[in-house]
Amino acid sequence: MFRNIAVCIIMVFLTGPVLCAENGYELWLRYRRTDDPARLEEYRRAVSGAVIPGKGATSEIIRSEFRMALPALLDKPVPVSSKPMRGNTVLAGTSKALKMTRFRISKADARRLNEEGYIIREHRVSGRRCIVITGNTDSAVLYGVFHFLRLLQTHQSLDGLDLCSGPRVRLRLLDHWDNLDGTIERGYAGRSLWNWDALPGKTDNRYKDYARACASIGINGTVVNNVNAKAESLTRPCLEKTAALAALIRPYGLRIYLSARFSAPIELGGLETADPRDRDVAEWWKRKTDEIYGLIPDFGGFLVKANSEGQPGPQEYGATHADGANMLANALAPHGGVVMWRAFVYDTRIDADRAKCAYKEFTPLDGRFSPNAFVQVKNGPIDFQPREPFHPLFGAMPLTPLMPELQITQEYLGQSTWLVFLAPQWKEFFDSDTYARGAGFPVSAVADGSADAHALSGIAGVANTGSDSTWCGHLFAQANWYAFGRLAWDHELSAAAIADEWIRMTWTNEGNTLRTIKRMMLGSWETCVNAMTPLGLHHIMREGHHYGPDPAFDGADRADWNSVYYHRADSTGIGFDRSRSGSDAVSQYSRPLSEQFNGLETCPEKFLLWFHRMPWNSRLQSGRLLRDELKFRYDSGVEEVVQMRRDWSSLEDKIDARRWNAVGRKLEAQEENARLWRRVCLEYFGKFAEGG
Ligand code: GCW
């Protein structure tokens, strides 16, 4: 990288500005010279140096971040020190560390800030105009520092700064579906970041780079192993490796969590049972948990996938999910840890409609979970589809903190080939009104705990990171990692605002390019829905790997692993009847939403075939017949991808060739795949539609 920069400097000297080849490794933390002269002047005046008086690893990280960022952004030497200095400085530290500046956080501020919130405020110190970045803890200050740097990266004014920001959700986690052998389940960006063979002795700079990127967007926890867990992760040697990792990422405010295999007491402890009501089993978990805390004092807790897709669980012993969760919660409670118990269950003996299973299993358990237990619920009732209505469990378990699980890795959304910006999808989810206790009861209020006054709140995103030099396999997939962190911090942010920040930091502040990329990103999710599963269709991807179309698939062992189960197309129509006269999944939603979903006239068209089975000649809002509308949607999907390619082509001289080419190649493959989707789906559905 340094060589690259040196070459660039020489080239700038000789020929004026050039676009240097970049590989994307720097993510949104590329600190480039501020190329707006007025802003550059302003920043140079406002920031003559940075003072970070704190001791400890986090303060050192902040110093090194400033040393990297400020001279680059301001294009001049900027002293960074732990000692006071003259001039208009940036002062960053906890209120204790900043004592000498006489900057006081008022009591009201302190309460508002809690543990992770920060203030960025202009403040006079001995007649000088300084910018103070402060909070109650080191990680709060670190978050504030990244926010401040973001202001510079995105060319915001520093005039009269007075910002205060705190996270709406307490636990903001990445879930890595990484296996101990270095593979990643549903990973499309190379191998796992964690090199378990080399740990604990040998670590990798990339761990710190990962933690730094997470800290820059407010992520404060990471579940390092797959929910399809191996008991081996809980063995002493593995825990020592995990502890080494935990020590590296701790100063960035990141805590480690582990997925726990429920049958570990049998596999590792030699017990005959894993029954959560068995004294020896509970004792084994208690000892194991104590051992973990002995190695990792700030260990976050366990994530558990139980009685789901072949994973062991309490139901094997006639015990409930709550029994299982509580046993682990009890072991964690003395240490302040949490258990995150997943609600991703779909036992067809519970209900023939997979979408209904989790609700039926979990709502009767509301109120029976320990205070430090979350139930972790995917955004929709099936499985991370391009579009789903929100999961009916949101709002239906008022006594239990629910932790939404979003999928950043695009398992069903074109993986690392498709450009799909997911913030609009997540916003649709957060903003959905559950009507659980009357109107105005959105999913976001369940997620942040405000709806039912839960002290615990959390959100998890299934990570899309890997060993690839771009981290995420697609340069635009980085935007989803970014957006997840930003929305976990503040779900009120708009998708457009997040895209704007990310583009400015990752690509450019230049207006025309910014607008073009933003347009591409903001339309990209609807494009994906149109191109793959319009009008509420779902789960018609190729079996197993879930890339590309296979609506005809009917060969799986389980009915609900087949595409035909979900679309039910024949010559009389298409769609899954989940209305009152069908599976009645609509009744799992509160009134009046259940009524709205139930009514053919009132059901939003985006969910039409999710909730209803429709004759091919039904007339839709556009005036088109269903069969024509489907064609129209698949056509639009392709056209929109073609337009994205055109947009991207127009940026050739605005973006460095390496990244421009990399994205161009991805878009080409995306177009090919969109065309395949259209061809396969229209041919297959068309056969029925013609006869209808
Ligand atoms: O989406 C499905 C995936 C599985 C995954 C499972 C889950 C980790 O296809 O690969 O397993 O969901 O969320 O548990």
Image (cartoon, helix red, strand yellow):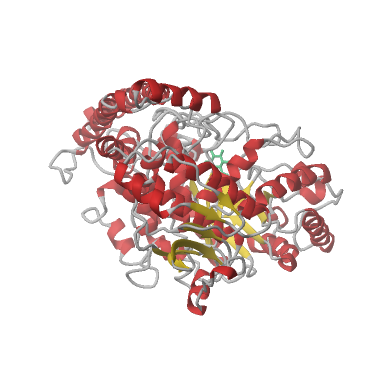
Q: Residue at x 39, y 54 (%)?
A: 429
Residue 386 in the image: x percent, y percent? 39, 41
Residue 226 in the image: x percent, y percent? 64, 42
Res. 637 in view: yes
**Height in image: 236 above or below 543?**
below
Q: Extreme right residue here?
A: 270
Comparing 187 with 438, the one in front is 187
User: In the drawing, does residue 296 fall left or right of residue 102?
Assistant: right
Q: Residue at x 81, y 48 (%)?
A: 266
Res. 155 in view: no
Comparing 470 with 17, the one in front is 17
**Height in image: 672 above or below 539?**
above
Residue 545 in the image: x percent, y percent? 51, 29
Comparing 376 with 360, the one in front is 376
Q: Residue at x 36, y 41 (%)?
A: 504
Q: State which image quarter holds ligand 1.
A: top right
Residue 265 in the image: x percent, y percent? 80, 51
**Height in image: 97 above or below 111?**
above
Quarter of the image for the C terminus: give it. top left
The quarter of the picture where residue 534 lies is top left
